[in-house]
Amino acid sequence: MYEIISNLTVNIAGVKFRNPVIAASGTFGIGNEYSGIFDISLLGGICTTALTMTPRQGNSGVRIWETPSGMLNSIGLENKGINHFIDNELPNLRRLGPAIIANLSGAESDEYVKGANLLDKSSVDMIELNISCPNVKVGGMAFGLDPGTAAALVSVVRRQCRNKPLMVKLSPNAPNLSSVALACINAGADALSLVNTFKAMAIDVAGRKPVFENITAGLSGPAIKPIALRMIWELFDTLKDDGKSDKPVIGLGGIACANDAIEFLMAGAAAIQVGSATFANPHIMTEIIDGILKYMQSHKMQNVSDISIRNK
């Protein structure tokens, strides 16, 4: 009886990842912040913080607020701009080893188009089109709530992505997420990622006012995991029914341990992203990688796709 060798590598829209564990956008900086804590090359991929054409200072006032089993954030897409990223941050990211996904955001369609054009010519491996951020007053989630609006943006950005695959990050706040997902794929998306944070809020009881200057913020953490998992499950069914099950889905939302990650993979995700959990445990992603490998070995699974229960 020969021994089955478990292979952690996954292929997402033509990009090879060492394993299915990816650092989520906005939670991992540009890699330097964690390089002294663990070996970054062990990760499957790194998704950059949201990148915009022009530098952004982000939101003023309170930005982070702890909630039971989660956190609210109102960062507001703070970044130094795409040109600065390409010239000063991307070279170091490339040296770290994992696949690089550039998270592209903007306030209007033209900004997305210009950003996609620059990133497509850079050395990133993939572009993640962010149409789901609830922390900005203009752009972001506004593009991801309506199928027609989402499709129009994906279509114009797709024309700029001649060299890089295009993944679209969906909002769980969309009234009909399945319709938005199909519209994005029909408009040219190579892959999808979901979910981003849920629109939520907190009130300062002592101050008798909302905690955040924007009133609402984005809820993440373990509290949203069961909902995110359900959305992955339902989206898989939607894509399968529409004959688009070949379009990979990256799952995220409250993943805080290996079992959480395995649940998402079972539900149909091709890979997963880890965000808020890294703040509580900087080693969590490597622990999740180890946990997935041990699970595969104990169940004599050869490939990550064998974990899924959706095609059984």
Image (cartoon, rainbow, N blue to C red):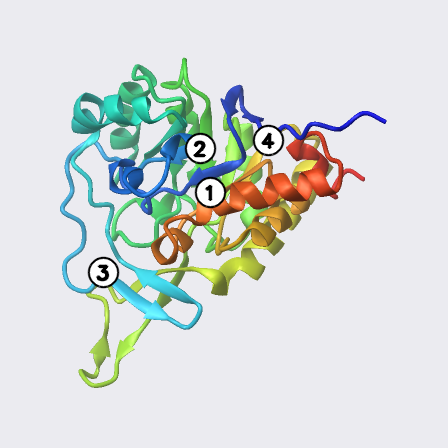
Mark 3 or 1: the one toward you: 1
Where 273 sits versus 220, above or below? above
Q: Is residue 132 left or right of residue 206?
A: right
Q: Secondary structure at mark 3?
A: loop
- The residue that appears at 54% across and 35% down in the rendered structure is 20
Q: Position of residue 308 (x, y in %)?
A: 70, 41
How far apart are the alpha carbons under marks 2 and 4?
Answer: 11 Å
How far apart are the alpha carbons under marks 2 and 1?
Answer: 7 Å
Q: Amino acid at mark 1?
A: Thr
Q: Which residue is mark 1?
A: 286
Q: Position of residue 72 (x, y in %)?
A: 33, 63
Q: Pointer 2 and pointer 1: residues touching (CB < 8 Å)?
A: yes
How far apart are the alpha carbons under marks 4 and 3?
Answer: 36 Å
Q: Which residue is mark 3?
A: 63
Q: Amino acid at mark 3?
A: Arg
Where 188 sits versus 239, above or below? above
N-terminal-most mark, 2 or 4: 4
N-terminal-most mark, 4 or 3: 4
* Closest to the observer, 49 or 191: 49
N-terminal-most mark, 2 or 1: 2
How far apart are the alpha carbons under marks 3 and 1?
Answer: 27 Å
* Closest to the observer, 49 or 112: 49
Mark 4 or 3: the one toward you: 4
Q: Quadrant of residue 156?
A: top left
Q: Is residue 9 visible?
A: yes
Q: Is residue 11 left or right of residue 198?
A: right
Determine which of the numbered discs, if any, sits on residue 8 in the image.
Answer: 4
